[in-house]
Image: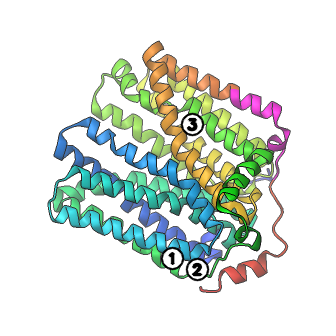
């Protein structure tokens, strides 16, 4: 990694300056993230108000997870077989309509749990199509060397929404009711729709057009299996989420070590989000990292060490510090991992590989929390955290030893034809 100064540590906003298309997409993503988190907060509270049941609130997760698992690969295959702009216009329009229906049911005061579950499932279904399609836009609009900055900016919009959304939703519901949260979600989708409208056409490659639907999905799975670098990036994510995620054990650890008060649990949960936001704000140096594979594995191992420290700690301030560090390092790992996947995946396959990435990032933490809960129940909550951290570190060490391709992966050179490509991509500034 080349020498850096303080200005190079701060988040790199060059993609926002150089690409009007990316700037509009990012703005839409930020607004959608804030509005989406306001909607998540509102749905959870509305379901609880109707049922007074935590189980009913937890069931919302099923209506998110099942469509994501069922339709993400389908969405990725479609994204690689038709004009991606047209597909995203359809998806964005449908998401805007669903957000409107959320607002209508709130305004009508229906208070029907099946309506809320149905709308959540519909929204998650279109989200499963949207995520892999949206991921294909970055490499069309930006040069490969700008991918770390683009990924960091994308993660910033996500984490900013996770922090601001619930705070704004609480105040909005207290003053105006659930309706305003759903309206804010609709406005976010409207901003995303405008950003997509301004994009140039993005037709599929000839090879992608001639590939059958089932064969195209199989082709993407074979590609990930054969590409040691892309496969390695996926493995690092799975090692962290499946083996190391400790979030399901937070309530038990809070009760055992810190008195069990809700306020303390809130500090533990928010600490990770705060660390993640800090990670995005100080992510500028990731664009100057040359040995991206080495730093990816190293950052994941450091994340595992922070999880281990949290499991061993019984002091609140120290535990919060470990969680903040976890969030910070997680952003670095995600930025580098997503950069490698974006740059090493052919354009004709980015929708399908992006769908696999979306499934890993959505499903991995859920399964990881189930694992953590099971181990914690059998062996105790701190042991559950420690075992998860230790297995994560061991898995990443094994990956570094067995896969020189990912360990030795270096940042690609700027594309020689990037100027002409970007001029085409910015045809509608």
Residue 281 visible at all: no
Alpha carbon distance from label 3 to label 1: 32 Å
- Name the residue tied to disc 3: 241
Q: Earlier in the sequence, mark 3 or mark 1?
A: 1
- Name the residue tied to disc 2: 199
Q: Is residue 260 magenta?
A: no
Callout 3 secondary element: helix
Q: Is residue 55 left or right of residue 228?
A: left
Question: Which stretch is magenta?
Answer: 395-410
Image quadrant of residue 150? bottom right
Image quadrant of residue 85? bottom right
Q: Is residue 396 magenta?
A: yes
Q: Main structural element of the magenta stretch: helix, strand or loop?
A: helix
Task: Identify the residue at horizontal 18%, vertical 59% (top origin).
Answer: 177
Image quadrant of residue 253? top left
Image coloring type: rainbow
- In the displayed structure, 289 sits above or below 249; it is below
- Badges 2 and 1: C-beta atoms under 8 Å apart? yes
Circle 3 residues within 10 Å: few <14, some 14–19, many ≥20: many
Residue nearest the observer in this picture, 339 or 267? 339
Alpha carbon distance from label 2 to label 1: 7 Å
Residue 201 visible at all: yes
Task: Identify the residue at horizontal 59%, vertical 26% (top origin).
Answer: 389
- Name the residue tied to disc 1: 195
Alpha carbon distance from label 3 to label 2: 34 Å
């Amino acid at each position: 990694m080349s020498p850096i100064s303080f200005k190079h540590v701060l988040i790199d906003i060059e993609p926002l300056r150089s690409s009007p298309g990316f700037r509009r997409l990012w703005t839409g993503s930020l607004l959608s993230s804030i509005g989406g988190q306001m909607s998540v907060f509102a749905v959870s509270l509305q379901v609880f108000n109707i049922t007074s049941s935590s189980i009913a609130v937890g069931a919302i997760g099923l209506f998110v997870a099942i469509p994501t698992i069922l339709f993400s690969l389908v969405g990725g295959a479609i994204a690689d077989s038709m004009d991606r702009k047209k597909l995203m216009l359809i998806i964005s329009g449908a998401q805007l309509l669903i957000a409107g229906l959320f607002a209508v049911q709130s305004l009508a005061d229906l208070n029907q749990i099946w309506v809320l579950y149905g709308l959540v499932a519909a929204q998650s279904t279109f989200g499963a199509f949207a995520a892999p399609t949206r991921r294909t836009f970055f490499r069309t609009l930006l040069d490969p060397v700008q991918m770390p900055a683009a990924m960091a900016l994308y993660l910033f919009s996500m984490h900013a929404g996770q922090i601001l959304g619930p705070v704004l939703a609480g105040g909005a519901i207290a003053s105006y009711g659930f309706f305003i949260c759903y309206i804010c979600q609709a406005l976010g989708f409207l901003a995303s729709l405008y950003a997509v409208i301004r994009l140039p056409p993005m037709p599929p490659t000839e090879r992608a057009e001639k590939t059958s639907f089932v064969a195209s999905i199989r082709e993407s799975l074979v590609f990930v299996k054969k590409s040691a670098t892309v496969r390695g990036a996926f493995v690092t994510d799975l090692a962290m989420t499946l083996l190391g995620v400790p979030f399901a054990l937070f309530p038990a650890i809070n009760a055992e070590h810190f008195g069990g008060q809700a306020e303390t649990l809130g500090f533990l949960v928010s600490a990770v989000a705060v660390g993640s936001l800090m990670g995005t704000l100080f992510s500028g140096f990731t664009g100057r990292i040359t040995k991206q594979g080495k730093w990816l594995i190293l950052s994941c191992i450091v994340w595992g060490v922070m999880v281990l420290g949290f499991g061993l700690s019984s002091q609140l301030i120290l535990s919060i510090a470990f969680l903040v560090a976890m969030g910070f390092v997680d952003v670095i790992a995600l930025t580098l991992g997503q950069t490698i996947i974006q740059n090493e995946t052919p354009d004709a396959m980015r929708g399908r590989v992006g769908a696999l990435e979306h499934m890993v990032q959505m499903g991995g933490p859920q399964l990881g929390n189930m694992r953590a809960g099971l181990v914690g129940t059998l062996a105790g909550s701190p042991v559950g955290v420690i075992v998860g951290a230790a297995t994560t570190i061991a898995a990443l060490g094994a990956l570094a030893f067995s896969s020189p391709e990912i360990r030795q992966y270096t940042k690609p050179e700027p594309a020689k034809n990037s100027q002409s490509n970007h001029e085409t991509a910015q045809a509608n500034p």
